[in-house]
Image: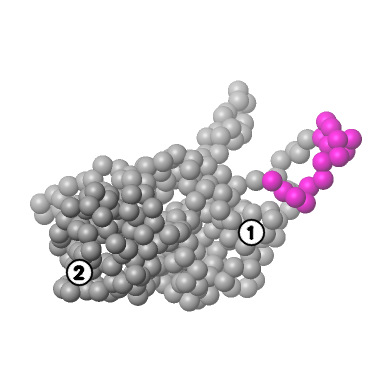
Amino acid sequence: MSDTNITAIIGDIANKKSCGGNETANTGKLGCLQLFGTPEHFIGVKKGYKIPATQDITLAWITGKVQDGTFTPIVGASAFEDMSAEDAYSTNSSGEKRINLKGLPEYKLMFEEGHEFYRQLARIETYKSMDFIILDDEGNWMLAQNSDGSYSGFRAGHVTPELTKRKVKGGDAESKSLVVQFLDRKQFDTNYAIIQADNIPFVPEEIPLVNGVNLAFINVPAAGVALDISTVLSADNSTTIEGLTTLTDWYVTVDGVDNPVTAVTSSASGVYQLTVSTLSIGDVVVVDLATATTSVVDSSGVLYRSTSITDTVA
């Protein structure tokens, strides 16, 4: 991490070497103890995204960041394991030790959820392309603190969803774990900040998560007729979705050209009729639960994302 407070005049820094850490530290214990509990939640952050020091941490703000893909909340772990590596030392012939490798933090969160959650968790396998904010079991946040005064997630290396562990009769429940190794030891030692839960106007369980939706044409699209679309949650492929009657919840193209929805009605649970401009035989219609700017829609505080469906007007 760069430090904008350091000057780098070559005549002042040539042949100059720091002899190690500071010889002094403020080790007094006055004031309230600031502690961090057991990690229980991750917020995946788009790599390099910085939160300004002036940002108001509200549920509306975090919802917007989930919608635009900046944040990926992974909430509600049932167990935590600290897999951080130990520091490594070398010993010379006189028995004197010196550190030669500082261990890197590595955290595992285990989840006991359904298989749609496990399938989605398996998609978050990556390397050096995400940062992570860590939330504990009391709702406190831990973030990296940058030299420019902004905040960010901790820089991650490997992000690995482990193989789903099957239920053992009379033993542990079925589970899937996510392991994250962090690459910047200094962020964890000194360059971090803790936000106490008392200062955040919502709890981690209120952070909106994106729910997958399966769409289907009930009837083959026809000229002069509204599009009949059914909606169910991907998690069970049966729970219908109510309340998607806002025009901007739907995104329709015809032969690759935007065709704005002019009316939405619901005739049955999870079934919607979308009125668009006149269709002609042979037109290729694509329907998505999305807006023109984001693939995630917010319906009464619940977030949804679908896979687009395609059919040809008969």
Q: Is residue 19 above or below residue 30?
A: above
Per the image, the residue denoted by label 1 is: 150
Membership of 22 in magenta stretch = no
Of 303 and 153, which appears nearest the observer? 303
Give me the C-alpha separation between circle 2 and circle 1: 43 Å
Outermost residue toward the right in this view: 11
Where is 284 relative to 267, above or below?
A: above
- The dot on residue 270 is 2
| Depth order, front residue of 244/72 | 244
Specify few, some or many for label 2: CA neighbours under 10 Å numbering under 14, 14-19, or 20 or more.
some
**Quick one: SS at disc 1?**
loop
Dot 2 or dot 1: first in sequence order is 1
Q: Residue at x 27, y 58 (%)?
A: 279
* Residue 271 seen by the camera: yes
| Residue that lies at the very extreme toward the top in this rendered image | 93
Front residue of this view, candidates 48 and 36? 48
Mark seen at residue 276: none
Magenta: main secondary structure: loop
Query: Is residue 105 among the parts visible in the rendering?
Result: no
- The amino acid on which the numbered mark 2 sits, given as a three-letter code, is Gly
Decide whether residue 10 is among the magenta residues. yes
- Asked where in the image residue 259 lies, by quadrant, the reply is bottom left
Q: Secondary structure at mark 2?
A: loop
Could you tell me which residue is drawn at 37 percent across and 46 percent down? 124
| The residue stretch that appears in magenta | 2-16
The image shows residue 85 at horizontal and vertical percentages of: 46, 40
Residue 249 x, y percent position in the rendering: 35, 66
- Residue sitting nearer the eye, 182 or 236: 236
